[in-house]
Every structure is written in structure tokens, then in C-alpha cells.
Amino acid sequence: MSRHLQDANATVTNPLPIDSLTTKQSNKRPRHNRPQPPSTPEISIPLLSLPLRPSTLTALLRSGFTTTGDVAQSLRARMNSEKNESERISDGSQNQNDDSLKHDHFAMEIGCSSSQAADYTCEIDSALKTVGLPTISLTTEETHDDPPSPPFSLFPATAAYLLSSKNTQNNPHATVARQIVSFSRPLDALLGGGIALSELTEIVGPPGSGKTQLAFQLCVDARLPSSYGGVEGCSVVIDSEGSWGASGVERCWDMAVALVDHVRSSARRKLEMKNAREGKADAALGPEEYASLVPEWFTPESILEGIHIFRVHDEASQTCTLYDLPRFLIEQEDKGLPVKLIVVDSMAFHYRMAASSSHSIRSINGKSGSFSTSPNVTRLATLLIEIASEFDLAVVAINHLTTKIDKDTKNGGGGTKLVPALGESWAHAVISRIMIDHRLHPESSADGTGRDVRICTLIKSPHKPQGTAEFIITDKGIRGVPSQNKQPVHH
Amino acid sequence: MSSNYSSVSYLPLHVFQNLISHRRSTQGCAITDPHELRQEIVGRLQKAGNATGNILRDAATNPLLDARNYDSKSTKPTAMVKELLKTHPTTLLRILDPLLTYSECKVFLDRVHKECASVAVSALKIMQQQHSPIDEDENYENANSPRLSHPTRPNFPHWKIPSGLPTLDAHLRGGFPLGSLSELVGRAGVGKTQLAQQLCVMAAMQGIGGSIYIDTEKKMNLIRLREIADGMNDKAKPKMEDHQSTRQVLENVTVQSLLTTEELMTALDVLTKEIVQRNAQASDFGNRKRRRLVGSDFSTEANPNLTRRLPLPVRLVVIDSIAAPIRRDFDLAQSSTISTSSLSPSSSSLASKRASALFQISRKLKQLGHDHKLAIVVVNQVGGGGAKRQDGKIDSIGPVKNMDFNDGEFTATLGTAWQYCVSTRIVLEHQNDPHKLRYDSGIYQCSGHSGSTRTATIAKSLISRNASLSFELSGRGLSEVAPSY
């Protein structure tokens, strides 16, 4: 596998600009689970399938060029017949003249100026590069702003290959953690270990149910060192609602302190047990031994420093920040602090402002008529999924519940129910969906924690069956319910 | 960030520089000058917007809500960044033909994204900001700053406005947070307006900042405000001169009266101006004050000019109440609204319009709070119980069951949508229902009275669990009492 990847890296010879995402990808990071094809033979494809400007297309089609082969032929024809003449021309001829000579024939066939023809050729070349095919132009110069090799592979990977690859989810051979734990055991068991990397997970729930608190806990837990089963990564938060301001950060600090304490005390306990077993019962913990178990950098300050918060105030800002995120992620990776978790809190807030007045209320089948956001939201969903798999991180999107008019006459008609916002297409795009709610009948227990119990329901997941789990929100963060059975309930 | 670039023509030139690929630019067919290129692109986008007519159609159907998104100076739609972001590169290719090729379109969009994206701040930095004083005056050396006779550097947890109820403040770790939206909910007469006024008083008295009070129900009673200020002052230590501290409060509170949702939105838009002006005044005063100090004696006797007027920067905005204008304009009980449009007056479209109006308002408020470091406190009403369905599902057209009311009789207005918008929620309740009348020996008697104990519960908060405390109203404002069972 590595041989193929080295070949892929070798095709891109020049340093490419930071502007485009695919640039850095093919340079730095091996594409996961995708073997690269051998070099492709020369093929001619129809012009209509290339992303060309309409004016270019009309000019070419009108003159009878239908495939790139036709254009290549026209260019080559000129070259061959003119070779003798160019030898007679003195060596002082510049590139410009050569170019224009090359394109004269082509220009004549189309019926435009030769510089215009050269323009068309450039465009066809760059379009071909986008698709990943060799260019038709005969110049070998590669300018710095040509797009690089394509983002897709022409050769599929077999399931056996994917399974044996170390990066597959749920792989028993995986040596690196593939989930971000919350700190509640039933919740982790429900999710199959935690929030999965390389996937888009959605957390939805009524207001005040604990979605943001869970997100705080996940951001802190993402930084858990790998020796403790964590992914050891930073987090990025897109904050649309302002919950990650002053109060939110205070909360993260509490959770970070609690996490560091927990890790340190468990390290200490382990070491003491080891000492006791080896007969060094009375030996005090030396700093070297202690440091070997808990990494030095693991402090609350560094945990908080690894949480990058982007405050976005409107929809345009949110969209732009998400599109620009790959560039930021690459920067962070270069600094040696890879991001392993992205939280969008919340995805729905800015989209709920669009009044549905511009669309008629869709009825009867209960399609949510609350807002008209489908095209943009699905594109963002696609982007998030791409980012998740490219950079191998977990994306958590927090969603709202919205009311939907239930026109179904079975239930007496005219009623309403609460459904997740953002529409059906978003619901299909997310991989896992978790709903958090308050417990329906909070018992007033002696310690007053009855009210803080939340129920988490796994609605949709490719890995685990549907089920519920409970957790509470304490001063230290999310924890499992102490007095109850620790197993999640599967339906 | 992107509000700076609402139109494509405001994008800076470096987005358009070197956009055309090198090979194409040497051919001489493409426009390479950034100015020209920008103008051309804007012109094409405008033409495309006019042709499809989407923007105009949206604006026509809902003048209340959509007209605000557009440049008020010109009536025809300009090329907006928001619309640009929604277009796919191939659509853009068609619109901008023949200015840019496909790859150049992609590069252009990437640059626009980079330009309008927001900047990351690490959580650690936010936390460190919290532990430093709120007003970061560059000319001010905080280490050596003299403490003036009026406590302009508050000695309480920063970035919070205390309410004067100790348990509440303790649970909220200082008080109502700056930069965030908080809500007070309760039935009529329970003390929401009083608590809001007390917040204004506390903010000014402790030198945190001034307030803007937006009154939509004509309930602001300035005499009561003065009473509360006097009452607070009596309890305060160190004591200041009565008239000075009350005066400080009164001079730092501005009151605006509005009635409709539209007026509220307009007021929010111009609020920025007032805030900036007052903040400038405050920092200007701070600078001048330092320069005019007589020697090192900061007492009031030596410097009588100092204490005459102390403008504080704005730190609190109170909207009392938000429910009144929304209920006026989007009344769900009857299906008619003030802004009748040609759409069907069914309650579902009204509910969604109301929800979107609420989200717009809360978005503006949050942005305001974040940009200027304000605490925004919104007062909400409680409506008569919406019909609870037999199967226990929530009836969400009207009021939504508030999770914390045990009997579900009374529910907060504005629905689920609004509950998502606020970060902190304090619910005020009577212990005995003062509105209930007892029929006793031939006459009706009211069972509640003004001195009765009420409870305040923290229903939603990022940093506190659900805690309750009891308080009572008196001539001096709200004060905490021991819970009476």
C-alpha cells in the first residue's frame, strides 16, 4: 500500500498554493483506504463533460470540436508542419511567438484570435487536470496555480483490504483509540466505546437537556493521552449560540481539572499497586516513575489551550468558517497538535431565522415546513463528512428540536410534535444520531440529583443497536448515574 | 466578521489579486486588474440576482422579517456574500462567464471563505480574559492604577452582574454573565421587573457599568428605581453619599419605550451607536479624571469634581418584556396578525414566522452582547396553560410546558424556539397564588400580599445546577429570606 501512495505523491512535483484543499492533501497525507491507480493511458473525452465556461463551449462546439482529441489533433497538426519553418527562424524567437504559432491553426479553425485560442487551451488543460487526466497542451511548464490531481480514485478498494487496514472502525487490531469517551460508562457502552472518529454524529434534544454540557465533556476528553485510551487531540468548536463564552469556558475548566485529577490519581494507584506487588511497599513515588505514567503536558491549562473556539454570528460566517476549516486543520497538524474533534454548537441556530414564508407550507406527509435550508445544509453536511474522513476526526453537530404540524387525522389531527430541525436530508446525512432528554419523572432523591438525570437515546447508528442510557451532570462533568445498573438498555 | 462584507463589492482587493492564472493572464484576454475584476464580478452577480428575482420575491412576502437583511440605502438587491456562498462553483461559472474559469471560480470562493471566516480563540485565552478587568484601556497601567473614591474597579468576580440575592449570585458564580443572554420568567406580579431594575441598580452602584432599559409594556417606574437605589445604598459598604450614589445609578440608566416587534428590531440596530457613544464617554472621563487628580488624595473632599458625574460604560441591556411585542404582532390565539399578508393565516405559518422573528432577535442580541461585553436580560411572561394533550405530547403551537413547573398549569410564552435562545433562565414563582381569591364568610379575600415569600429557581444555566432560593419584595427591592415551608 505504501508503494502506491509514494507514487501518488511523486506525481505532484511542484509546491502548490495553500488555496486549495486537495493540494495539501496529496502532498502531505496519505489518503486513507485508497490504493492509487497506475498511470492512465491517453484518452479523449467529450468536451461537454468538462467544466468549461459556456462561451468556450459554444465557440468550440460551433466549430466542430467535440472531444479533447479533436483539439489535441488541431494543435499537433500545426506543430508538425511548422517544425521545418521554426528551425529556420533564428534562436531569438520567444516563447510567445511559439505559442501563437502553435495556436494559429487552432485559432483559424475556431475563428478567433490566437491569444483567445491560447486562452481556451489553458482552460481545457486546467479542466483536464481537475479531472485527473493528462493535458493536451504541449507546453511542459507547470505554473504554480494549476489545480492538482483529482480527489477521487478510479480504482475501488476491496472490503478485505479495508478491514485489514488499521484505520477501520471497530477493528480489533486497532492500536490507536478510535473513539472519544464521555465519562459515563453506560453512555460509552451505548455508543460502542464513545463518539467515533471519522464520522458525523448528531446530538439533538430539547433546550436545557445537556447537549452543550456533553460537548464540553467531549472536548476535554479528546485530549486524553493515548496511554489512557484517548485520542490525544485538540478540538475545534464552531460556536453559533455563544454558549462557549465566559461561562462555558469556566465549565470546561472544571471538567479539565476533574479529568486531570482522575488520571493522576489512577496513575498513582496503579503505581502503588505495582510497587506493592513487587515488594517495594514503602517506596515513595519518585517523580520519574510518576512522569512515566502521566505525560507532563497533560494539565488543565493545556487542555483548555487545545480547545479552539470560533464564534460565528450569522449564517454566512458559519458557512465560511466551515469551508475554511481544512486550512486551519492543516495548520494545526503542522504544528504537531492535530485536531481530533469538531463540535458545531449549534448547527441549527442560524438556519432557523429564515422564515418559511417564501415557500408554501408543505403538508400532508409531514415534511417539515419550518424552514427552507435544504441545499446549503446538505452541502455543509457533505463538507463535514469529508473533513471527518480526510482528517480522521470526530464531528459532532448539535441540533434543535422544532415543532412539526401533524396533519395526520389518525391522532385526532391538528396536533404537533417535536422533531429534529434541519430537515430530512440532514437526517440522512448524519451517521449517528443521539437524542438527549430529561428523565420524564424526576424523583426527588435525597441528594437532589434526581433532577439532573438525563436520558440518552441512540436513534440511529451503523454500529450499535438502538437503546438508551442515563447519565447525570455533576460539578465535575458528565458521569454515570451512581446508584443504578451500569448497563445500557438495548431495544 | 462577515457583516463587514455583506456585499461582494466590499471584499478587499487582495481577494481579487492574482486570481487569473498566470498562463491566462499573459494571453491578454482576461481582466487582471483587481478593481476592474471586482466591479465586473459585482455587476454580473447583480444581473443574475435581478434575473432570478428570488431576492425580490422573498422581500415582498414578508416585509417585516426579510427587508432587514438588505442594504437599507438602496432598494435594488446588491451582490451579497450570503448569496454568493450558496452558489455552486458551476453556477458561478455560468454567471461570471467569461471572466473566470472553473478552477479560478473555486479559488475565488476559497478566498471569500477565508476572508469571511471568523478567527479562533483558545478557551484558555477566554478564561484569562475573564480574570483581568473588563475595560482594557491601553493607556491604563493596571498595576499602578490608583483606586479612585468611586469603585470603578470592581472587586467582585469579573464579567458578572450581581443580583443582590446572595444564593443566586453564589450559584451563578457571581451573577448574570456578560456576553450572554439571560431570561427572567414568571407570572404577573411576581417581581420580574423589580429584579431587572435591581440589576440596573447593582450594576451602576458597583461601578460595573450602566444600563439600557427597553420597556415594551410601559411598566418602568422611575420612582421605584430610585427607591431600590436608595435601599441598596443603605446596605452597601463602603457607604457613599446617598444622593451621589443614587444619582450615579439614575444617570447611567437610559430608558426606551417601544411597542411593536419592528420597533424593537430597529432599536436593536441603533443600540450599537448609543453603546459606543457611552463607552467612549466613560473611557474619556476615566482618562480625564486621572489627569485631574489633585496630588495623591483621591477623597471626595479634595476632588469634588470627580464625584459629580461618573459615566460608566454600558454593561447591561434589559428588555422588559420580550413577550409583549411578540404576542401583539404574532398572536396565536387568533389567527390574524398586524402585518396581514396574502399567505394563508393558518396558525402553522404564523408560528414559524414567530419562531423566525425570535431567532432573529436573539441573534442580534447575542451579537450585541458579545461585541460589546454586555449582559442581556430579557423578561418573559407566563401564559395561561396551553391545552395539554391526552397522550402527554407537547402542544407546541402555543405555550410550551416548562419542564420545571410541576403541575403544568402555567407555561412560559414564546414556545420552544425561544427556550433554545437563552443561556440562563431564572424562574420566579409565588409560593401562594396571590391571584386566587378565597370566598370567606361572605366576602372575597385575596390570599397573597405584597410581602409574601416568592421563590427563584435557576432553571437553565451552563454553570449551575437547578437551585432554588426564597426572596421577598420590600421597599428596598428584592432581598433574600430563609425559605419558609
Image: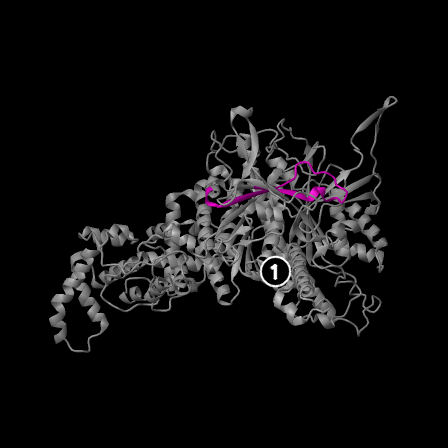
> Along the line of sight, which residue is nearer the eye, A421 or A481?
A481
Picture coordinates of residue B210, whole percent (x, y): 71, 55
Q: What span is in magenta?
A: A428-457
Look at mark 1 in the image and give the residue it sits on: B123
Is residue A426 rendered magenta in the image?
Answer: no
Picture coordinates of residue A273, whole percent (x, y): 68, 62
Picture coordinates of residue A429, whole percent (x, y): 46, 45
Dot 1: chain letter: B
In the image, taking residue A277 as reference, residue B35 lies left or right, namely left
Q: Is residue A243 above or below residue A330?
A: above
In the image, taking residue B112 as reference, residue A84 lies left or right, namely left
Picture coordinates of residue B119, whole percent (x, y): 54, 60
Quick one: SS at disc 1?
helix
| Residue B38 in sight here | no
Q: Is residue A421 above or below residue B148?
A: above
Q: Amino acid at mark 1?
A: Ala
